[in-house]
């Protein structure tokens, strides 16, 4: 009799709730699965589930509007949901994981009135796995290997006497003009190899060009002043200039005192160089290396002296100043191309031509991508052009289909 009375009470309580407008809780999601996210460093897991039967417009007042995702880390549950997804979503990618921890996930469906479903969980704990190879970057690896192979092949061909063509660079032809002008006017030349040390490739490129300038200066017996902002650069510049005089057969004309260290301080160095320029009035100024805010100060001082000026740097912020104040400017990569061309070393020439192969490949990809995108717009995504475009975007460029 007691059991029957409890049953009657429960039935009457339920009936009273329905009469007062209360709604039953939504049905839970099912089939929760957790898998390791591929192609990552063990930082991600993917949670999937089957949508609640109440995740539809016809579900009425207990229609599911949100899924709350809870996470347990090594058995310790989270107090707040790690994610909230709108109805209709059945997948969550957790990117905040660690490869040395075990995870378990729970999915709770929340109705429009705030009622929550029973907990749907994935019973097995799972640990993210560190991937040794990102398969989505396969084509990137292929392109890198292709370009590296092109550099190696071009270098070997250059070592065996293969003729390497480098397009004419106006700044290189201006070197002879600058040296000739300084010789005619009987005034010295200034060469500034930047203000950074030898660990900067732009400094090395500038010193390579210094060798060529020094050889021309040795032939015409025109003095070259080389103030440096780093002691190692001073030593390298002396060796480069001495080698140039030796190659020209004019070793007696080399004066190592003209290659000297000033200071590491940026504007202290600039003040000393500009003071020398104002006193000596050089006929030609070369600024080849890595420069910063001092570029315009040097170039304007040289311009005020009436010198012919040749500049080159890969610092994009300083290029406008050199272009405005100098007669010739080696823009960005032209500095390295000029250095490789003047050095004549197979390693530098091979690297230069190998990079050109990479640029050709990039242009081919751009042209193919443009043609395929146009074809996909005309004939649709399901056409051959559309499928090829999607493959190029997703697998080669690692972008979305619409990107």
Image: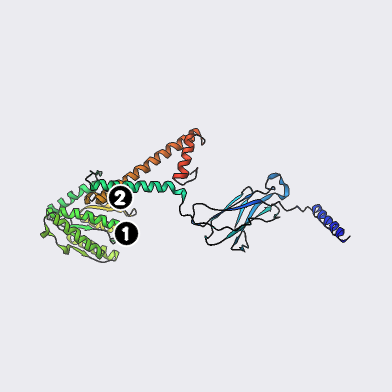
Q: Is residue 180 left or right of residue 43?
A: left
Q: Residue at x 16, y 63 (%)?
A: 256
> Which residue is label 1 attached to?
293
x and y, in percent, of residue 32 in the image:
63, 52
SS under mark 2: helix
CA–CA distance in space, label 1 to label 2:
20 Å
Q: Nearer the viewer, mark 1 or mark 2?
A: 2
For label 1, the SS is loop
Examine the image and state in which quarter residue 56 appears: top right
Residue 383 percent location from the top left of the image: 50, 34
Given residues 186 and 211, the one toward you in this image is 211
- The dot on residue 218 is none
* In-image side of 112 versus 311 (left or right): right
- Residue 288 visible in rendering: no
Left or right of 43? Residue 66 is right
Q: Residue furthest front?
A: 124
Q: Which of marks 1 and 2 is nearer the N terminus?
A: 1
Q: In this view, does 167 lie above or below 35?
A: above
Q: Which residue lies furthest to the right in this view?
A: 1
**The N terminus lies in quadrant:** bottom right
Residues packed near mark 2 inside 10 Å, few (<14), some (14 to 19) or many (20 plus): some
Q: How many marks?
A: 2
Q: Colour scheme in the image?
A: rainbow
Q: Do the residues labelled 1 and 2 touch (CB within 8 Å)?
A: no
Q: Which mark is residue 333?
A: 2
Q: Residue 367: x and y, percent?
A: 39, 39
Viewer-side residue, 60 vs 247: 247
């Amino acid at each position: 009799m007691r059991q029957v009375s409890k049953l009657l009470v429960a039935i009457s309580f339920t009936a009273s709730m329905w009469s007062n407008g209360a709604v039953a809780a939504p049905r839970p999601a099912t089939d929760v699965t957790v898998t390791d996210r591929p192609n990552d460093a063990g930082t991600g897991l993917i949670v999937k589930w089957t949508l609640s039967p109440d995740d539809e417009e016809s579900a009425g007042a207990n229609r599911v509007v949100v899924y709350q995702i809870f996470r347990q880390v090594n058995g310790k549950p989270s107090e707040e949901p790690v994610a909230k997804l709108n109805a209709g979503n059945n997948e969550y990618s957790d990117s905040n994981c660690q490869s040395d921890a075990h995870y378990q996930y729970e999915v709770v469906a929340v109705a429009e009135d705030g009622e929550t479903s029973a907990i749907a969980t994935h019973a097995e704990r799972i640990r993210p796995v560190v991937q040794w190879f990102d398969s989505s970057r396969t084509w990137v690896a292929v392109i890198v290997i292709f370009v590296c192979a092109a550099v190696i092949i071009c270098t070997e061909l250059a070592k065996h006497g293969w003729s390497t063509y480098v397009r004419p660079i106006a700044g290189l032809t201006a070197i002879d003009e600058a040296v000739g002008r300084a010789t005619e006017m009987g005034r010295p030349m200034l060469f500034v190899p930047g203000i950074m040390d030898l660990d900067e490739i732009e400094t090395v490129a500038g010193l390579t060009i210094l060798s060529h300038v020094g050889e021309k200066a040795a032939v015409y017996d025109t003095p070259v002043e080389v103030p440096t902002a780093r002691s190692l650069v001073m030593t390298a510049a002396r060796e480069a200039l001495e080698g140039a005089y030796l190659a020209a057969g004019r070793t007696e004309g080399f004066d190592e005192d003209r290659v000297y260290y000033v200071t590491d301080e940026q504007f202290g160095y600039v003040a000393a160089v500009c003071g020398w320029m104002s006193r000596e009035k050089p006929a030609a100024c070369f600024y080849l290396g890595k420069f910063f805010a001092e570029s315009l100060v040097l170039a304007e001082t040289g311009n005020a002296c009436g010198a012919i000026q040749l500049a080159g740097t890969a610092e994009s912020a300083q290029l406008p100043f050199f272009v405005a104040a100098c007669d010739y400017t080696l823009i960005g990569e032209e500095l390295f191309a000029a250095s490789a061309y003047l050095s004549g070393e197979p390693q530098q020439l091979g690297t230069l031509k190998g990079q050109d192969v990479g640029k050709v490949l990039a242009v081919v990809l751009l042209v193919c991508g443009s043609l395929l995108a146009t074809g996909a717009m005309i004939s649709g995504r399901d056409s051959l052009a559309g499928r090829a475009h999607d493959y190029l975007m997703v697998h080669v460029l690692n972008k979305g289909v619409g990107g």
